[in-house]
Amino acid sequence: MSAILEARNLRAAYGDRPVIFGIDLAVPERGIVALLGANGAGKTTTLRALLAEVRTWGDVRYQGQSIAGKSTQDLVRMGMVMVPEGRGTFTDFTVEENLLLGAYSRRDKDGIRRDIERMYGYFPVLGQRRKQRAGSMSGGEQQMLAIARALMSRPKLLLLDEPSLGLAPLIVQEIFGILTTINREEGVSMLLVEQDAVRALKVATYAYLLETGRVALEGTAEQLAASDDVRRAYLGY
Amino acid sequence: MTEFIQLVLAGTANGCIYGLLALALVLIYRSTHIINFGQGEMAMFSTYICWSFLNAGMGYWVAVPLTLILAFAAGIAVQRVLIRPVQNAPELTIVIVTLGLYLFFNSLALWIYSGVPKPFPLPTGIRQASWQVGDIFIIPYHLFIFAVLITLMAVLYVLFQRTKLGLGLRAAAAQPASSRLVGINVNWMLALGWGIAAAAGALAGMLSAPVVQLEPNFMATILIFSFASATLGGFDSPPGAVVGGIAIGNIVALGGRYIEFIGTQLDIVLALVVIVAVLLIRPAGLFGRQVVQRV
């Protein structure tokens, strides 16, 4: 199976303070990979490093090409898109403007129109609120908007940062359902950072467990779900 | 009554100019949360450039658009060369840089053009003589200034609200981090914002020069009134800046006439009074958004 994303010895620092120390990871084409770990393990930093948002070293290949020296906006144009923690909602803009902003790197007006309607199909609640100020929506609605906004750029690889954070279980279930649908039907690969390891291991095929900036354990989702270490330390039972 | 109307007409014309410069201040404040103290002097220098073109025999309607394009480019250049390197520095650092801009353009103008006032013509086709309607004299140039302001507002409205570029400019100003994540070149958007602001300021300079005479300090007072306008309208609201400008123009015109001790010598104090009053009563200004900050 070929990988859409492959990182070798990925390191990153905030200023002079190193945060991740040589991570190897791969996301297969059309696959979902989970990145697990406690608070401060370096999960978010790993995503930000892949998108060149922090000082980064190491060899990262995206679709077989090295992406050294590319800026965040180059990478977005190449189809590597983040759904940030806290959702990154453009709060003072309408729902529809948020979706248009998601498609900012595209030029095909008709395609963008069609995709907006498609998003309203996936997330009917967004369609009902298209003229509403995005900042006035609930957390779950904003998370749906964040995913829809990312999809508007026609990504090949989604980097999802804690999509379940602070949401009611039913909403989380709905969001994960839609994510798996999108993965299956549109072939979008996903790298999923999650605190809710049980949920993440259900949708992912492969997973990495980070501990203080290093990969502590990796394996298929079944292997990790069955691992006593993971269960005790991170799943809490 | 006649006098009152006359004062309102003149006050509104001046106010349009304050509004234009305030608009420039607001465009930059919205995206970077700094006040460009050099805005007035950049406008002043642009006006001198236009004067040089006119002096060399160029027509008004060629010289002004050409100057606007140059001011736009200069605004971008200033942002990229001077502001961008200190963009993430503390606000005080950036404020000092903009004060440096003030001194730089002021000295440069004095060095090149000397301090002797230069006459600046009315636009070709705008007549000097006023129209008389009943007892009231209407100055054509005042109407012209008003028309220019309305046109510019319409153009900016279409740009910001109806185009993709405008959406990007607004997004980059409001939420730079999220904007980067959707592929917007935020640095470039901020630079364009400086360019638009510089062009709006240049327009303010070229519109006021025929009335007040062109000399290196001629925008200084106007800048103070523009601060008052932007404060009154709300520092994050472009329409507010323009409404605030017209309000300040009228407050100064009417206050100078009807409050006895103010006259024309103390009119700048009125601006200060407005600034203090707004900050005490409604700090966000008339059209600004109240920002609730958790501390």
Image: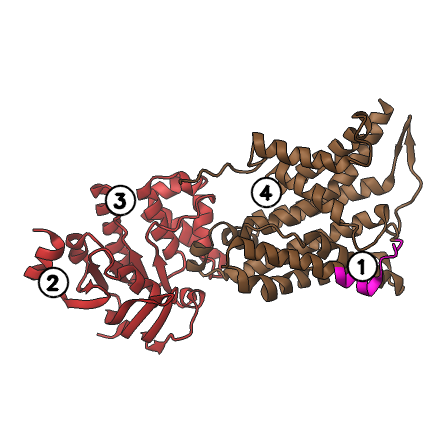
Q: Secondary structure at mark 1?
A: helix
A234 relative to B187 in the view: left or right: left
Residue B124 point in image, percent of width and height: 88, 52
Evaluate whether residue B286 shows in this view: no
Single out the mark in the foreground, 3 or 1. 1
- Mark 2–mark 4 Cα distance, whole angstroms, equals 54 Å
Quarter of the image where one finds residue A10: bottom left
- Mark 3–mark 1 Cα distance, whole angstroms, equals 58 Å
- Mark 3–mark 4 Cα distance, whole angstroms, equals 34 Å
* Chain hosting mark 2: A
Q: Is residue A131 magenta?
A: no
Disc 4 residue type (three-letter): Phe
Q: In the depicted view, which residue is nearer to us: B246 or A132?
A: B246
**What letter labels the chain drawn in red?**
A
- Mark 1–mark 4 Cα distance, whole angstroms, equals 28 Å
* Residue range highlighted in magenta: B107-119
Disc 3 residue type (three-letter): Gly
Q: Which residue is mark 1?
A: B48
Single out the mark in the foreground, 2 or 4. 4
Residue A35 point in image, percent of width and height: 22, 61
Q: Which residue is mark 4?
A: B235
Q: Which residue is mark 2?
A: A224
Q: Which residue is mark 3?
A: A166
State the mark number for residue B281. none
